[in-house]
Structures are given as C-alpha cells and as structure tokens.
C-alpha cells in the first residue's frame, strides 16, 4: 500500500483544519503534524513519518505553507534537517520516539557540537575526549561556533574515543542533554551584533552509553550520514523564481526607481540569471533525486547559493547608496526581515554563508575530488595516529 | 514529460548520437573536414539525417520528422557539439528547420522539410537575428512581385539585397530570406543555384562552422510566409536556435571539462599530479559548476519551448546567456590548465575555444540576452 501525493495533501489538510496555523501555537500545530506522520514522510510510522517516498514531502509542506504555517525546518533549524535523520537511523526506537516529537514540535531545540577551536574545516582532527566509565562516557573538551546552543536542550556531539589511531577512525557520536552538569555555554557575539552561536565547555560531562549513536569508533561515518541527509533534503525545498536573496534585490529595485542606472540594471540582471540558473539546477537535482540519482548538485547548490547571496546583498547595499552606511543597532535582536536596515543586516550576515556548513574552499575540494575524481591533496596526517598529528 | 525528466528514450538517443559522432566524426575527421572547401561532409550529414534520423527530431512525422520534441533535438545537438561535428547544424538544424516548422503552410512544409530532415538537402536563414531576437527594422533585402504578381512556371517574386553573416550560407541548397515588401517583412525561399544568387564564403574564426555573404540581384523567390506571419516565425526560429546552440555549448563545455580533468590527473609537476594542487582543482570545480548551470538553463529552455511552460523569450535568453558564458569560460580555462600544449594547433582545445567564441557571438551576445532578460524580469516590475 503506497500513499500518493493526493492522499498526503488530504492528510495535511486534515491537520491544518483541526489546528488552524493562524490560531494554534506552533508547538501544538507541529506536534499534530508529527503525529500525523507529516514531519518527515520517509520516516517510520510512529516517528513522525509514514514510510512514504521522500519526494512526497513537498506536497505536505505546500499545504502547511498555504494555510499560513511555518516552513518545518525553521521550527528547529539544526535539528530538523541535520540531526533527525541520524537519530532515526541510529537511536533505539524508544529514544528516537522520546527525542523526535519535541524536536519536530519545536519544544526542544537541538544543536550540533562539532567544530572546535582547533578543528573546523578539518573536523576529523577534533580533540574533545570521551572516556568510557562503566555504562557512561566522561567527556572533556571545548566546542565552538555552536549555533543555538544557548537555546537548545539537546546536542549531538562528536568526540575522540581513541587517540592512537588515525584521526577518522577514533571518533564516536553521542547525544548530549545540555542540562547535564559540566556543560557550560557562553554566547559569542557575531559581527552582526547578534549572538546566535556559542562556545561550549565540556567538563567531566557524563553521557549514558545508551545515548551513543552508532558503534564506538564509527563517529565519522555517522556524521557523514548527516551530510547525505542534507543532500536528500534538497528535494523538500520549494523554490520559486525570484525568491530568496534575489527576491530581496528585486523588491529593493522596484522600490527605488531613482537609483536605476543602466549599469545597475545590467548588474541586477546578471545576478538574476545566476540565481535562475542555480534554481533550475536545484529543480533538475530534485528530478534526479526522485529517481535515486544524486549528482553534484547539492554541493554546487551550497557553493553557488552562498557566494551568490553575498553578491546580491553587496548589490543591495550599493543600491542603497548613503543609506547603506546606516545600521540600526548592534544591540538589537531583530529577526532577519525586521527593522529599517534589514538589507544591511542581511549583507553582514551573508559573510557567514561561505564559512558555515563547509567553506567555499572546502566545497571546491569536494567537487574536485569526489565529483571530478581529481587526485587528493598531499596529506601529511592521513595514516598517522591522531596523537602524532601536528596542531596549532 | 515533466521538465528535466530525462527518459530512457532520451538516454538511448544520447548514447546513439554519441557513438555515431565518436566513431564517424572523431577529431582527425573534424580537422580534415574543416580544411576542405565546403567545410563539411555532405555524406556524413546525410547519414545523420537518414540513418540516425536526428535532424528532424522536433519535426512532425507528417513532414518527415520524428515528432519527438525539442528536448530530444537538444540532446542530439549537445552530442554533436561535444565532438564539433562539421555540418550545417546552425543554418539547417537550428534555424531553417524550426523556421519552416512554423512559417508557411503544409504545402511549403511538405515541399521543403522532408529533404532537410533526411539530410539530403541543406538550408539556411538569412535574416537579422544577431541581436538575440528577430529585428524586423534591420531587414534590408527587398522583394518585388514579378509581373502582375504571379508568373506561370516561375516563383512569383524576385529578391535583391546583400545578406551578411549567413551561417552555412555557401553550401546551402535553399536560402530562407527575410525581405521587405510594400506591406512589411515577408519570408521567401530562394534556390541557391538560381540566377541572381552570388555567394562569397567568409574566412571564419571557427573553421568548423562556415558563413558566407550572399548577394541577391533579382533572384527568383517563392513566398513562404507573408507579412503577418513572417516576423513571429522568425522570432520563434531565433529562440529555438538560441536554445539549440545552448545545448551545443553544454556539449562542448562538458567535453572540455572532461579533457581537462583527464589532463590534470595524468600530468605530474613537482612530483605530484597537477590536479592535486588546489589552484588547479578549484578552477576545475568552477568549470563543473559552470557546465552544470548551463545544462540546467539550456534544458529548461528546451522544455519551456517544447511545452509552453515559460515565457519563451525569457527561457531562450536564460539558456543562451548562461550557456555562452559557461562555454567561453570553460574553454578558456581548458587552454590555461593545459599549459603550452593548450596553445598549440595540435591540441583540440583551440577548436572548442573558437567554437565557444563564435557561439557566444551568434544569435545574440551575452550582453544582448542579459538586456532581454532585464526587459522581462526587471523592467516589467
Ligand atoms: C554562522 C556560523 C554558524 C556555525 N554553526 C556551527 C554549528 O552549529 N556547529 C558547528 O559544529 N559548527 C558551526 N560553525 C562552524 C563552521 O562549520 C566552521 O567555521 C567551518 O567549518 C570552518 O572552520 P574554521 O572556522 O575552523 O575555519 P578554518 O578551517 O580554520 O578555515 C579558515 C580558512 O582556511 C580555509 N581552509 C581550511 N582548510 C583548507 C584546505 N584544506 N584547503 C583550502 N582552504 C582551506 C577555509 O576555507 C577558510 O577560508 C558555524 C560557523 C558559522 C560562521
């Protein structure tokens, strides 16, 4: 018995009818959405899914959006796309059930404790140690740039469990309750003025072995499955022409006829073309993904999308002219679209796009080595025990 | 078929054309052909039409075509572009056939299309299309009804004028000419062998694709489409031509990317393969991105014109602008990453670079298509 897009949409309509998005609080709505199996259609029944093809997700999300509901990923930005898939794949069912509903409802936010002061692009070089003690693990170390940690209840963590083997082999993946004693979270202020990421200190933090996802020493493989989830989730996105950053630029252009010059018009048209070629590439990737064919499009999407957003907001700020020199306040906590200087804030925020989630340099390496199969860079750290690898 | 749904039929078509082109139009054949006077091999062209049946994939079956649609035609053109097949791809396949498919009536279609589709005759279009659309104001050729309009046994009209940059113009059997009448611009068919037709082959930057200046002095002509129909039909041909050239650009770009990846994988300097250096690897990654974006834009164009799912001019301009930029950049990067060998006559990179250059200046430059896009996406607010 396979479900089709029509039936998915009907289920979705039932939920938005019984929980009108414009009236019911988000956690209640998204909890019902989860209970109906609509959060991740391809997940098992009872864990927020219907064992249905992932390609049907768009049909559900469209109903939610049209009824005024949130884009599901925004309810739990890190948890929804990046973490949930790993939990469902590696956690025992009762733990997955315990974690996923509040995650989907947005009642408990999740964050990702991966990067460290000494390990960013070279994530596998990380130094946070986990040592086994009976049924528990004891963790010591420091994480950094952790988005949303200051608001989150749970985190996924990669730690080193064996320093005597090469770096990729000695890692293990855990779920951490951020209320555990020994966890200390300090917000870090970003160049936008807001503090959305944090440094997280782990001092003799005890994690039950039941909260280990995957085998000891297999943390790298587990974290890689997270990456392939990201790829697959491309297909869930609804991408309309002229939306996103280029949509912001079009709106600004339309509202400032006095700033129209032939040169600016050409520049915007060229940005529009790049955005459109990118949007079409994502559309093409979706069709491939529906057939189980995965090309280089996800890495391309991240690379092009991030660089393009920078160029688009550079254009916007230039179109603003002297007004572009203003910035409402570095102390406010306004959302992305709020306030009179939203373009400036997005302009500043866009600098992060080419750093977070894999830098542009690393993505070009990925395209070169994994897609084009070019020879790898010379590696001095590959077959050396982690303990002996030089570090800054 | 939904956009970007590459069916098994399309995959099979691609494999068939690729096999044929690599077997019968490998680099030595391309080089030998481009040095000949005609610049193409009529027999190879005939086989593409008659044996493979890939010149009229978008033409209705009743006019000799396969009725498979523009996407299928784009796939075939992409593969021909990958090996730089010499032949009237631009004049006949990308312009004359799409033009005749919409201009005129079933009588003219039956008269001309089957032979063009079979590759036994060739045709070209002489009209101002270089701005990315049909520019009626730029038509300078003139047409006059002969005698009292129609002379028994004759064609009824005579056309005069000098026609510049006519693609594949020296070898074409049939010239489709936009000419001015008392009432506007109409489309005429001129037999290239007729009296009053003089053709001067031009020395071209891209030796694999020829052009000619055609001078008509009272050449006998047959009316194909009148003043009401001709401008739209020519604009349609310009859009289809742009999309098919975009597909060709994807094929050529992919070929250059593949060649370059192979080279930088096998060549060692400083004790390691060139491709292990990031400056080289990252440029290859950028080539990949450019080719993939061009592929999306070109096939969106083909699907949009085939199924009527987007503003046709916008879709064609997106395709041509994105693919032109991609092919030019990729071909230039290929020369750079090959080093000295890339600058030799012996290496094929220059053949692709020259095709990329010519393509980017044909049927609208990048700047002209950017301008057309701006007119639709920005100015209409
Ligand atoms: C807004 C924001 C949110 C983030 N959120 C999270 C989060 O929630 N959880 C988390 O774990 N992390 C998070 N990060 C961290 C992010 O993943 C890292 O910043 C990123 O991976 C880069 O690591 P790094 O900062 O250590 O820089 P480095 O790795 O030191 O890189 C510095 C520069 O060197 C370049 N470089 C590095 N290695 C190479 C190489 N091999 N070849 C060529 N160039 C190279 C990089 O591209 C970069 O330009 C976030 C970052 C930002 C900016």
Image (tube, rainbow, N blue to C red):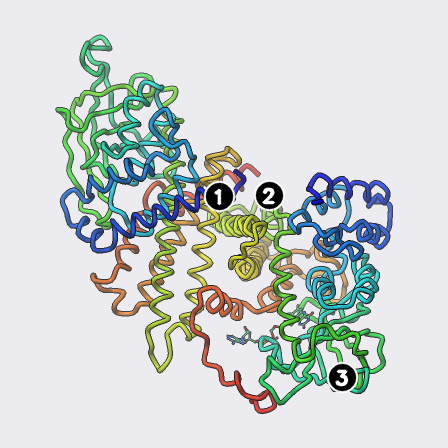
Q: Quadrant of residue A84?
A: bottom right
Q: Which mark is residue A74?
A: none
Q: In the image, residue B90 lies at what x, y percent?
A: 30, 40
Instruction: From this view, report whether residue B4 is shown above or below residue A308.
Output: above
* Residue under label 1: B7
Image depth: mark 2 or mark 3 in front: 3
Q: In the image, residue B151 lies at what x, y percent?
A: 20, 10
Task: Give me the C-alpha separation between circle 1 and circle 2.
Answer: 41 Å
* Residue under label 3: A139
Dot 3 surroundings within 10 Å: few (below 14), some, or many (20 or more)?
Answer: many
Task: Give me the C-alpha separation between circle 1 and circle 3.
Answer: 52 Å
Q: Which mark is residue A254?
A: 2
Mark 2 lies on a secondary structure that is helix
Instruction: From this view, report whether residue B179 is shown above or below residue B35.
Output: above
| Label 3 lies in ligand 1 vicinity (Cβ under 8 Å) | no
Tell me the residue at 82%/44% (across/down): A15
Residues flagged by tags 2 and 3 on a common chain: yes
Q: Residue furthest front?
A: A1
Q: Quadrant of residue A48?
A: bottom right
Tell me the residue at 42%/66% (across/down): B283
Which one is in front, B294 or B7? B7
Is B11 on the left or on the right of A231, as rendered? left
Q: Is residue B98 visible?
A: yes
Q: Chain of mark 1?
A: B
Q: In the image, residue A153 lies at what x, y percent?
A: 82, 69
Q: Chain of mark 2?
A: A
Q: Tell whether label 2 touches label 1 (CB within 8 Å).
A: no
């Amino acid at each position: 018995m396979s479900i089709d897009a029509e039936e998915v949409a009907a289920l979705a309509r039932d939920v938005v009818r019984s929980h009108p998005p414009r009236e019911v609080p988000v956690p209640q709505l998204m909890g019902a959405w989860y209970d109906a199996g609509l959060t991740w259609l391809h997940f098992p029944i009872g864990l927020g899914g219907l064992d249905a093809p992932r390609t049907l997700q768009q049909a559900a999300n469209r109903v939610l959006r049209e009824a005024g509901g949130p884009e599901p990923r925004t309810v739990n930005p890190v948890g929804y796309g990046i973490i949930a898939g790993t939990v469902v794949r590696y956690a025992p069912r009762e733990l997955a059930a315990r974690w996923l509903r509040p995650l989907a409802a947005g009642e408990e936010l999740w964050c990702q404790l991966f990067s460290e002061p000494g390990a960013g692009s070279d994530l596998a070089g990380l130094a946070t140690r986990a040592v086994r003690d009976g049924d528990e693990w004891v963790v010591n170390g420091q994480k950094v740039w952790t988005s949303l940690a200051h608001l989150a209840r749970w985190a996924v963590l990669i730690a080193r469990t064996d320093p005597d083997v090469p770096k990729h082999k000695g890692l293990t993946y855990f779920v951490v309750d951020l209320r555990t004693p020994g966890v200390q979270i300090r917000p870090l202020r970003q160049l936008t003025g807001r503090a959305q990421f944090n440094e997280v200190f782990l001092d003799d933090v005890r994690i039950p072995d039941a909260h280990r996802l995957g085998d000891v020493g297999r943390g790298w493989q587990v974290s890689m499955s997270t990456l392939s989830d990201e790829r697959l989730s491309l297909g869930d996105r609804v991408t309309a022409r002229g939306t996103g950053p280029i949509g912001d630029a079009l709106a600004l252009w339309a509202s400032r006829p006095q700033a129209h010059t032939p040169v600016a018009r050409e520049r915007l048209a060229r940005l529009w073309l790049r955005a459109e070629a990118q949007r079409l590439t994502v559309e093409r990737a979706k069709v491939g993904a529906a057939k189980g064919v995965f090309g280089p499009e996800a890495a391309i999407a991240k690379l092009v999308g991030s660089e393009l957003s920078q160029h688009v907001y550079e254009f916007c700020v230039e179109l603003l002219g002297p007004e572009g020199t203003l910035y409402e306040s570095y102390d406010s906590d306004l959302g992305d679209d709020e306030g009179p200087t939203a373009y400036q804030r997005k302009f500043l925020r866009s600098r992060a796009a080419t750093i977070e989630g894999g830098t542009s340099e690393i993505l070009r390496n990925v395209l070169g080595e994994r897609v084009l199969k070019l020879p790898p860079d010379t590696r001095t750290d590959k077959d050396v025990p982690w303990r002996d690898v030089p570090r800054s | 078929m939904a956009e970007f749904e590459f069916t098994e039929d399309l995959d099979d078509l691609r494999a068939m054309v690729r096999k044929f082109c690599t077997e019968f139009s490998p680099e030595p054949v391309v080089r030998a052909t481009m040095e000949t006077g005609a610049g193409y091999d009529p027999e190879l062209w005939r086989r593409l039409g008659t044996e493979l049946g890939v010149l009229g994939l978008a033409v209705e079956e009743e006019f000799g075509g396969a009725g498979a649609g523009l996407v299928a035609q784009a796939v075939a053109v992409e593969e021909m572009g990958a090996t730089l097949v010499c032949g009237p791809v631009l004049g006949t396949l990308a312009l004359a056939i799409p033009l005749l498919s919409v201009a005129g009536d079933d009588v003219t279609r039956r008269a001309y299309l089957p032979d063009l589709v079979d590759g036994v005759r060739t045709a070209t279009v002489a009209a101002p299309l270089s701005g990315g659309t049909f520019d009626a104001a730029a038509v300078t050729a003139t047409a006059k009804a002969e005698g009292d309009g129609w002379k028994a046994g004759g064609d009824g009209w005579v056309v005069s004028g000098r026609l510049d940059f006519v693609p594949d113009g020296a070898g074409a059997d049939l010239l489709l000419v936009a000419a001015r009448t008392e009432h506007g611009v109409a489309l005429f068919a001129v037999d290239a062998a007729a009296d009053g037709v003089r053709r001067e082959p031009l020395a071209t930057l891209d030796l694999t694709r020829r052009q000619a200046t055609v001078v008509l002095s009272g050449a006998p002509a047959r009316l194909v489409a009148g003043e009401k129909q001709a401008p739209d039909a020519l604009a349609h041909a310009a859009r289809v031509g742009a999309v098919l050239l975009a597909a060709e650009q994807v094929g050529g770009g992919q070929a250059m990317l593949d060649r370059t990846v192979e080279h930088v994988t096998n060549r060692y300097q400083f004790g390691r393969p060139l491709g292990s250096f990031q400056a080289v690897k990252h440029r290859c990654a950028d080539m990949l991105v450019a080719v993939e974006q061009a592929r999306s834009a070109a096939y969106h164009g083909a699907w949009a014109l085939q199924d009527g799912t987007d503003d046709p001019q916008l879709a064609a301009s997106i395709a041509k602008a994105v693919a032109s930029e991609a092919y030019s950049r990729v071909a230039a990067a290929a020369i750079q990453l090959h080093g000295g060998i890339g600058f030799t006559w012996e290496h094929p990179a220059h053949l692709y670079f020259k095709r990329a250059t010519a393509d980017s200046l044909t049927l609208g430059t990048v700047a002209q298509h950017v301008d057309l896009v701006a007119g639709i996406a920005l100015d209409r607010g």
